Image (cartoon, helix red, strand yellow):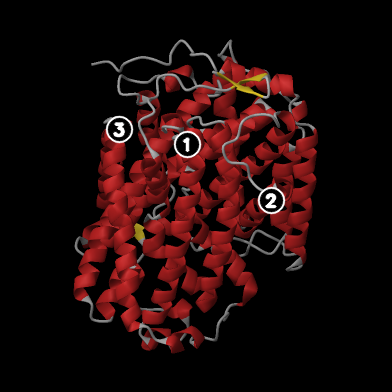
Amino acid sequence: MASQSAGVTLTRPADVGLKREMGLVGATWASETSIIGSGWLFGALFAAQAAGTAALLGWVIGGIAVVILALVHAELGAMYPVSGGTARFPHFAYGSVAGISFGFFSWLQAVTVAPIECYAVFTYLSYYWPAVYDSKTSTITGLGFGMTIVLLAIFTMINFLGMRLFSRVNSGLTWWKIAIPVLAIIVLLTQFKASNFGAGGGFMPYGVKALFGAIPSAGIVFAYLGFEQADQLAGEVKNAQRNLPRAIIYSVLIGTVIYIMLQVVFIGAIPPSQLAHGFAKISNANVLAGPFAGLAGLVGLAWLAVILRIDAFISPFGTGLIYVTSTSRIGYGLARNRYYPQIFAKVDSRGVPWISLICAFLLGLVFLLPFPSWHSLVGLVTSASVLMYAGAPLSLGAFRRQVPEAPRSYRLPGAAIVSPIAFIIANLLIYWSGLEVLWKLGIAIVIGYVLIGISMAFDKERPPLNWRAAQWLPVYLIGMGIISWQGQYAGGAVAPPLNTGHIPFWWDMLVVAGFSLIIYYWARAVRLPKDEMLELVGRQAAPSPVESATPPA
C-alpha cells in the first residue's frame, strides 16, 4: 500500500485477510473494555492498603503517565494502522533485533491478562461458590483452576465469531462495564465521610516511597492498561487514521476520571471502624475478597452488593475477551514481522487469525500455573506492559527523523519534548515494580529470544538482523536491571530483599531519568536509515503466501 505526500510515494504496511469492520465507537470500547476490567474491582483496596489516602495521588500520577503514553500511541497508530501495532512499530524503526524484544513484550503482557481476569471472576464468585477460592491462602483452588480453563475457552470461542459480531458483543459489555462503576460512585457518595481522608495516619501514612511503589504493584498502572487495544486491532478499524487517535484518547480520559472517583468513594464510604489500625489493616473478609461489593454490604446497601457481584463477572469477562483478541492479533503481527512461524498469520473466512487465537488460549494456560492469584500476576504483567510501552516513544522519535513527510492524521504536539518524557515515565514505572518482578520478567525475555530465534532460523524470508540499530538495547535492558538491583524497590514480599538499596531514594529516580535520556537519544541516533526502514515496511505491504486460509473442518 502506498500514499502520496508532498510528491513523494510513501510505502505503508497492509494487513491482508483482516476485515475493517470496527468504527470509532467500537475502537473506543475495545480500549475502554480493557481499561475497565478487574482493576476497578481490586485497585482501590490494594492502592489504599499500600499508600493510604495518598492512593488518590497515585491514581492521578498513573493517569497522567498513561495519558502521555497514550498520546504517543495515538500518533503511531494514525501513521501506521496495523494490527498488533505495539509489536510492529519498533520493528519498522529499529529493525528486527530491537523489534523482537518489544514485540515479545507486547505478546507477553497480552497473553497473561486473560488469566488475571479469570482469577478476578472466581475471587468474587467465591462469595456464592466458596469451593473455587481459598480465602486463607488467597489462591484459586483446583476447582477454580479448572473453571478458569473453561472460561478461557469461552473467550476463545467468542473470538471465532469474527470482528463485526465480536465488536457488537464487546460494545454491549462495555456499556454495562462503564454504567456499573458510575452507579457505584453515585450511590457510595451518599455514604461519604470526609474524616476518613485523615484516618490511618494522615494523608500519606506510609511515605512517598510507598506511594511510588504502589503505582505499579497495587494495580494502579495495571488498571489503566489496555488503552493500546485500538492500536492492536488497527488492521480492523474503519478509517483508522481518523478513528484510532480519537479512540485511544477518549478511552484514557474516561478511564482516568472513573478510577480517581472510585478511589474517592472507596476511602470516603468505608466505615471508620475498619480504619482504626490504618488502611493496611482493613480486616473485613468480604471487603478483602470483593472490595466494592463487600463495602456495599458493610454499609447496608445489599442491593448494590448484588449488582457489583454480577458485574464482577461481566467486567473481567469483557476484558479477558478483548485480551484474547489482541493476543491473537499481536501473534499475527509478529508473524508479519517474520518473528513467529507464518502459520500464525493464517486467517479464516471471517478474518480471524485462528491459529494465533488457539495458541493464545493454550499459552494463556501456561501462565495460570506459577501465579495462583490476581495480585501475584499483576506486577509481572505491569512490567511487561510498560516495557512494551517504552518502545512507542523510541519509535516515535525515530519516525520523526526517518519519515517526517509521512501523513499523520494526529501529530503529537511538542513531540521532541513529550516523547523522551514518555520514555522516562515508562522506565520509572518499570523501576518501581521492583527487582523481584524484573528478574522473573528477565527469564521470560530470555525464553522469548530462544523461541523466536528458533522460528527465524527456519524462515528463509526472515528480515535481516539489524545489530547496529539495536546496539543500545542490551545496555538498556541490563542497565535497568542493575539500577533496580542497586535501587530502593524490591517488589513483592521477599525476605531478605534482592535489591541492595545503595542508590538513595530520590537519587534513584534521577538516575533512572538520566539513564533513560541517554538510551533515548542513543537509540534515535542509530535508528535505521530511511531506505532500510521503508524496505521493512515494504516487506509487509504485499500479502504473504499464508495470509488467507480457512481452518480445517
Residue 193 appears in which quarter of the rendering? bottom left
Report the amino acid beneath label 2. Val
- Residue placed under numbered mark 1 in the picture: 232
Vertical side of 153 occupied by 385: above or below = below
Q: Amino acid at mark 1?
A: Gln
The residue sitting at 43% across, 53% down in the picture is 35
Return the mark for residue 164: 3
Q: Which of the two residues, 124 or 63, is positioned nearer the viewer here?
A: 63
Measure the alpha-carbon separation of dots 1 and 3: 16 Å
Residue 136 appears in view: yes
| First in residue order: circle 2 vs circle 3 | 3
The location of residue 229, given as percent across then percent down, is 45, 42
User: Which residue is farthest front?
Assistant: 6
Residue drawn at point x = 46 percent, y = 48 percent:
226
Residue picked out by circle 2: 418
How many angstroms separate mark 2 from mark 3 (CA)? 36 Å
